[in-house]
Structure formats: C-alpha cells, structure tokens
Image: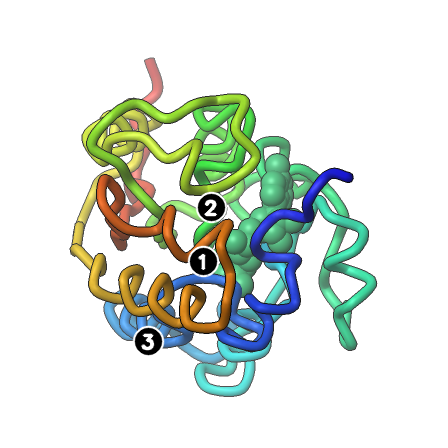
Amino acid sequence: MVEAPLWERPTMRAVAGNTLRPGGFSITDRAAEFIGMLPGWRVLDVGCGLGATMHRLRARFGARTYGVELSASQLAQTGDTAGMVMAAGDRLPFRADLFHALFCECVFSLLDDRRSALRHTHRVLRPGGFLVLSDLCAEDAGTPEADSCAGRAGPLSDTRRLVAQCGLDILLVEDHSPRLRELAAQLAFAGESGGGGSCGGRLGYFLMIARKPEVTNAG
Ligand SMILES: C[S@@+](CC[C@H](N)C(=O)[O-])C[C@H]1O[C@@H](n2cnc3c(N)ncnc32)[C@H](O)[C@@H]1O
C-alpha cells in the first residue's frame, strides 16, 4: 500500500494542527509584518493545505484571502473552502496584477515546474507585490521524483537564482532551521518514522521575501 505523504498523516495533524509546516504561524506572522500587510490586501496562498494561513491572515491582518490546493483530500478536510480553488501551484488560474502578496509555505519543492510557478507568481502579483516563500532546503540537489518535501528539497542558492531570474527582487532571506528540527523532534516523539528522522541532517528551513518591481522595464 502506498503511504500517504507526511502532511496527510494523522501524526502531522496531531503535532502541527492545521499548519502543516515547521514553525506554525511564527514565520507567517513574521513575513506579514515584514511586508506591512494591510487590511483589504488580496493575498494568495499557494498549496494552502487546510487553509490555516488564509484564516490567520484574514483574522489577524484583515486580508482578503484566496488559496490554491492540488489535493482533493486536503480540500475535503477543510471546513471553510471559501476562496479556495483546486489547481496546481505552477499554473495559477488568476488574472495578471491581482495580488498584493503571494504566500507559498512548505510547498515550493513539491512543485513540478518551479520556474513556471515563479513566472506565474510574477504575473499574478501587482507591481510592488510580495512573494513570501518558506521551504526546506538541502546541501545537495534533491530528487525530483521523490514524493516528500525532504526528498525533493535542493540548495537555497538554486531557489535564490530562480527567483531573481524570474524578475523578483529578493529583500530578505532568513534561516529558520531550528523550527524544522523542533517539528522533526515532535514527529519522532509521536512515533512518525517517515518524517521525523528525515527532517534532520542535510536539511534546513528558510524564509525568503521577494518583491515584484514597481515598474517593469519592457524590452
Ligand atoms: C507540507 S503541506 C503545506 C500546506 C500549507 N501550505 C501549510 O503550510 O499548512 C504541502 C501542501 O502542498 C500541496 N501541494 C503539493 N503539490 C502541489 C501542487 N503542485 N500545487 C498545489 N499544491 C500542492 C499538498 O497537497 C499540501 O497541501
């Protein structure tokens, strides 16, 4: 029998609640404060999982939130699916220049075409809009066909290069690896063999914030 991915297992829910990532809301709040999120901002959460970040950004910052999620089972477990659409994170079904911010938390390494995802990100962000990207990174190249964030994560320098190549200006890169180690320890303590152990060693966790330039030079 094929094992469910870590984020769909009961142990992950028991340990992390609805935030299926390291750090819970701490990194989310840090990012929202850094970008100066204001009430009424349109914010897209790519790979929104159970919608925890959408709910948080509505309740705490007054954002108007939208979500994209590929998994029918994640959507089915979500009580409130308002603003969510089922779609792939590397082909965003939204018009250009729409969002003040786009969050992508613990999802980027799972996307099949990361360059396409960043091109779509650039397209759907308003001029001056922000990308908030948090994810695992690894010392060595990941395995594209792996079915876990841990297995697919690659070097942070690759992500930096790709973000810049797609026309986004990087404003901040922070190391949040201690949050990954905390989650790994909690998972291991809860008896999760498939995720806890693999979260250590070669892996780290980062927050990157980038911005679409206010004026895009044509040509
Ligand atoms: C580790 S969970 C993180 C969920 C959420 N961002 C959070 O932090 O709670 C990864 C999520 O990405 C979703 N996902 C995986 N591949 C995707 C894709 N190609 N497009 C959109 N979502 C995807 C999974 O279904 C899952 O909900």
Residue 100's label in the rendered image is 1
Horizontal side, residue 7 vs residue 79: left or right: left
* Image point (20%, 32%), residue name: 139
Query: At which x and y percent is residue 141?
Result: 30, 23
* CB within 8 Å, label 3 to label 2: no
* Image point (73%, 48%), residue name: 71
Identified by mark 3, the residue type is Ser
* Distance in Å between CA atoms under marks 3 and 2: 24 Å
Report crowding for label 2: few under 14, some 14 to 19, many 20 or more residues within 10 A (C-alpha): many
Q: Nearer the viewer, residue 121 or 51?
A: 51
Reading the chain from its start, which is encountered first: label 3 or label 2?
Answer: 3
Horizontal side, residue 129 vs residue 17: left or right: left
Q: Nearer the viewer, residue 159 or 195?
A: 195
The image quadrant of residue 137 is top left
Report crowding for label 1: few under 14, some 14 to 19, many 20 or more residues within 10 A (C-alpha): many
The N terminus sits in image quarter: top right
